Image (cartoon, grey):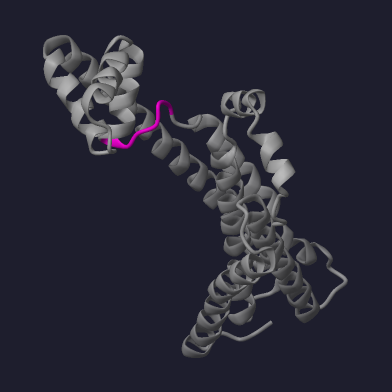
Amino acid sequence: MKKPTRATLYAEHLPEAVRARLQLQRPSQNVADAVLGGIDGCVTTFAVVAGAVGAGFPASVALILGFANLLADGFSMAVSNYESIKALHEQIEATKRTEENHIEEIPEGEREEVRQIFGNKGFSGELLEQIVDTIAQDRRLWVETMLTEEYGLQRSGPSPLKSALVTFASFLLVGAIPLLPFLFGHMDMQSQFYLSAVLAGLVFAGIGMAKGFVFGKAVIRSGIGTLLTAGTASSLAFVTGFLLRGMLGIEAY
């Protein structure tokens, strides 16, 4: 990613620009969901294709197994993501209730926690007491401070449903790409597999580069890294299918 100029950085840190940026909802969670869903979807389907080809199965078997795994694994991954984020929300709410009860029952003890938290950050004396008094005057701020500083939790987590839908959609859309060549019956199995491998490789590299761009990392390096990681998983599937075909004496079609 190109390094911003000093003038750009200055403009981005003007009071109104900072205020507007802090009010925006951060999209990083959904970006991560889309990247994870896309990579996992493509790896899943191409690994099935590679395993089927390595085992000598016909294109129809690779296609059926690919789409079956695409739907089943995509749904399973979306549900897992939903339950994981929902559990995080439940943890946040339970911790909020605990802190609200502590503030109600033992406010001086909770003030001491705030005092020590900010004391460890280098504040002391009258300034430290002002910070404690300011936080303790606002119950909502007090609870949120304890969530963040004591437990390392955010005030609210991402939407479970939205994350699940993004994961599922990304899994299906990207995961279907390696299966497209097997829809063309006029092509021979070898050509279908080669084209599927090329498409999968382009997808892996593209997702890696997009991830690098979004998160400010080296775009080419990120693309190559994702390609190598996903390619290794697919190669293992092909080798496994090939070895099992020989061990079980399966005739190649």
Asked if the magenta segment contains residue 176, the reply would be no
Q: In this image, 55 relative to 116: left or right?
A: right
Residue 153 in the image: x percent, y percent?
35, 34
Residue at 38% in and 28% down:
89
Question: For the stretch drawn in magenta, what is the main secondary structure?
Answer: loop
* Depth check, front residue: 63 or 197: 197
Vertical placement of 249 versus 61: above or below? below
Q: Position of residue 20 (x, y in %)?
A: 64, 24
In the rendered picture of this protein, how many numbered marks are placed on residues?
0
At 36% from the left edge and 34% from the top edge, which residue is drawn?
88
Which residue occupies the extreme front position in the image?
A: 126
Q: Specify the segment rendered in magenta.
A: 151-156
In this rendering, would 32 be left or right of 10? left
Q: Is residue 3 in view?
A: yes
From the viewer's side, name the closer residue of 109 and 177.
109
Q: Is residue 175 visible?
A: no
Q: Is residue 152 magenta?
A: yes
User: Residue 8 location in percent, x, y?
Assistant: 73, 42
**Image quadrant occupied by the N terminus:** bottom right
Task: Indicate left or right for 24 with 5 as reference.
Answer: left
Of the pair 41 and 204, the residue shown nearer to us: 204
Residue 46 in picture, x, y percent from top left: 63, 67
Q: Is residue 232 left or right of residue 16?
A: left
> Up-down: is 32 above or below 159?
below
Identify the residue shown where x is 56% and y is 47%: 32
117 or 245, which is in the foreground?
117
Residue 225, by quadrant, is bottom right
Instruction: Please identify the quarter of the rendering in which residue 231 is found.
Output: bottom right
Q: Quadrant of residue 168?
A: top right
